Every structure is written in structure tokens, then in C-alpha cells.
Amino acid sequence: MTIFVAIAAYRDADLALTMADCLAKARWPGDLRFGVCWQFAPGDVPPPDAGPAPIRRIDVPWQHSQGACWARDRALSLWDGETFLFQIDSHHRFVAGWDALLIDQIEASGTDRPLLTTYAQGFDPEAPPPAGGQPTAMMLHGFTDQGIAHFAQVARPQWVGGPPRRARFLSAHLIFTLGRFVGDVPYDPDLYFIGEEISLAIRAFTHGYDLLHPSAHVMWHEYSRRQRVMHWQDHQAAARDTASLDKVQQFLAGRITGRFGLGPARSLAEYETYAGVDFAARRATPAARRGDEPGPPPPPGRDVRAPRPWHVRIAVPRSAVPAAALDRAPFWYVGFHDVAGVEVARVDAEADEIRRLCGTGDAMIALERRFIAARPPVRWTIHPTDRRRHWLPPLGGAIEPENLITS
């Protein structure tokens, strides 16, 4: 089983050390195949020409570089049918036997299209070699002014051992998956930097790949950028960046089709439900912001447009419900909406149910609803009335993945 190690390096003096450590720490270094897009200026330290593993290289003078995603696409063009793809950056250090660890995780995943990814723990190249480490997860950190999701890292020491854990998001500096991913989900060279990871996560997910975090510590990543020249320091990149941001916005709105659009296996709405995000509203569930493991994704290959059963649980603090809604209200509107805010189902609470719910004295008022809908529900709304059927202020919130059951 061969591993294609794809690296896009922009004027990075650490590239040679990264490749050397990758080889030195591999259990089967002879099974590695490197594909490197080396963007350089005169005097920059080049990668090695040869070693224990074959090295394919595209050399690009720095003036002709068009950014990170363009360079990743060039590196991936060197794939030659290897069993696995390992996409990394040019500034990493590895644990002993990293290749065996990742292959073990793939085999333990229980899915046909596993994709291992995470934000690796950091290291300082000026300090002693890193030692120790623990698994990590990705959590939503926020949204840019354009509504593009970006992420942060959270440690998960309790995950050590066992199969990989489900992931909501994707890191471009650690992707380990089937080699066929190169053709299944081609890299979009038009993207510049921001939005690369969320668009690739969605495209992988909608092509039927299951996003997973390794339950083992595999590698370290250098985050400081102190010793590197960044592409935007050398280039007037404003126009390229603006065009890229616009394309990501269009993609998140479901308006990009074709080679770099959504896959046929799952929908954008299903990704939002799975990951706990709402791009139109720029909201995320608390679980997504904590980096909690999500519930199982919908199986790929199903007709996502076909109506299907949904089972949703809602818990509302009693203190949030207007007092007048608890006093002989004839009904409450209970509605469910998709990512665009369109109602997909309405299953009201009638007077008998309201009396029963309010009579328990519990701090939380819990409702469960079952209905048939073609589009996944992402948000719920309760619009209570008073005894005279006057509308009272509505309540609403995102549906947490653990409170959404499909069949």
C-alpha cells in the first residue's frame, strides 16, 4: 500500500526538514511517494532531489505562484494511483510510525470513504524536538465578515485508543484518505486562502466522504509563521483574494455547480445539519463551537430530495415562556425550518398537550415531534398564544444534531 504525500511549499526553509522527518518516522518509508509544488526565490533552500522514497516535483519561480490552493492543486496533479493520499504543509514533525497509525485508523473507521483530518498540535522549530501529544478536534471559532466559517483546535485526551471519531470540519494541513480522493474531489485552484477548508469539507462530505478525527496523536504543525515568507507578502493579492472570497460565498449559498461544486451523495443542507452550522444566518450550535463529536451523517447515495421521516426533540426553559402562554392557551405554533428559513413542517401543540407540559413543574418544557419532510430541519420555532388566541413573542433555536433523528 503506497502513500502519496502531497506538499505545497512557498519559500519555506523547513520543507527539507519536514520531508526528512516524515521519512525517518515512517514505519514503511519505501512505500512513500512525494509530490511537491516548490515555489521558490533565488537562495531559498530547495527540497531534496532524491531519497529513500521517490520525489516528484514541480518547480515554480515565486513570481508565477498563484496562491495556496493553486499550489495544492499542482502538487496533487503528481498523484499516480497511490493507495492513500496524505496532504500536509511544509512545516511538520511526526510521531514514530505515523503511517501505520493512520492506516490503522482508516481500517478501524468502518466506512467506505474515510477522511482523517484535524488541526495538529503545534511545535516550535527553534525549541528541542517535540515530545508527547494527544488527539485533537476542530471546533468552529467564528464567521468572517463574508460569512465564511473558520476553526480552532481543542485537545481530546479522552479519545486515545479505539476507532477515529466523527468530525464536523476539515484541516487542509492534515488530510489522510483514499488516493482516489484526488479525482473524486478535485482541488479548486481559484481559491486563495480563506474558505479553503470549509468549502473542501462540504465538497468531501457531499461526495460521500466521512470526516473523521484520528483517535491517536500523529504529527505536529508549526503555526507561528516566524521563519516563513507568506505569499501575500510577496504579491499584490487583493484582487485574487476578493475573487476567491466571492466564490466561497457563492459556494456556501449553493450557487456553484460543476467540477468544484457540491457532490451528488449528500446535500449542503445535510452538511449544515450534521455540522451544526447555518451559513445564511451565520450561526452555529453550542456543540459545533465546543468541537463535540457530531451524530452519524446521513448515508451517502440516498435521494436527498425524497421526503423522509424526522424525529426532533426540543427543550425550552420554562422561564423563557411568557406566563400568559402557560395559562389556558388554546395552541402553540411549533414549526421547523430549513437552512434558508423556509418552513418544512408545522406540528402545533394543542391545549391538552400544553396543559400536560406545563403541569409537570419541570424547569425545562420538553416537546418531541415526528413529521415527514424532504429538506432537513435546521431550526425550530415555538410561537405561543394566550387564552384569547393573541400571539405572544416567539421562541426559537438551532436543532442540535443529537436531538435530530432520521430514518
Image (spheres, rainbow, N blue to C red):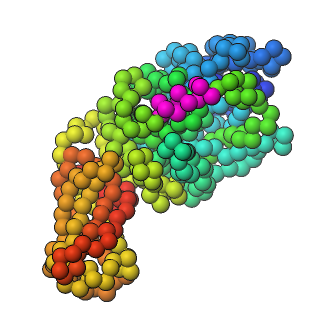
Give residue 263's position: percent from left, percent from top: 35, 31
Q: Residue at x 27, y 83 (%)?
A: 324
Residue found 18% across the figure and 76% down from its top: 389
Q: Is residue 219 left or right of residue 331?
A: right
On the image, the x and y values in percent for residue 360 come to 28, 85
Q: Quadrant of residue 370?
A: bottom left
Is residue 29 among what the camera can see? Answer: no
The mark total stands at 0
Q: Nearer the viewer, residue 28 or 217?
A: 217
Residue at x-position 31% and y-position 34%: 265
Query: Is residue 397 among what the camera can see?
Result: yes
- Judged left or right of residue 41, residue 136 is left
Q: Which residue does the image show at 53% across and 22% down from the upper left?
A: 189
Residue 384 x/y as whole percent: 25, 73
The verdict on residue 243 being magenta is: yes
Q: Position of residue 268 (x, y in %)?
A: 36, 40
Main structural element of the magenta stretch: helix, strand or loop?
Answer: helix
In the image, residue 385 above or below residue 33: below
Q: Would you place residue 265 above or below residue 329 in this image? A: above
Q: Quadrant of residue 232?
A: top right
> Which of 259/293 is in front?
259
Give the side of residue 12 with respect to residue 367, left or right: right
Q: Quadrant of residue 398?
A: bottom left
**Magenta includes 154?**
no
Q: Which residues are magenta?
A: 238-248
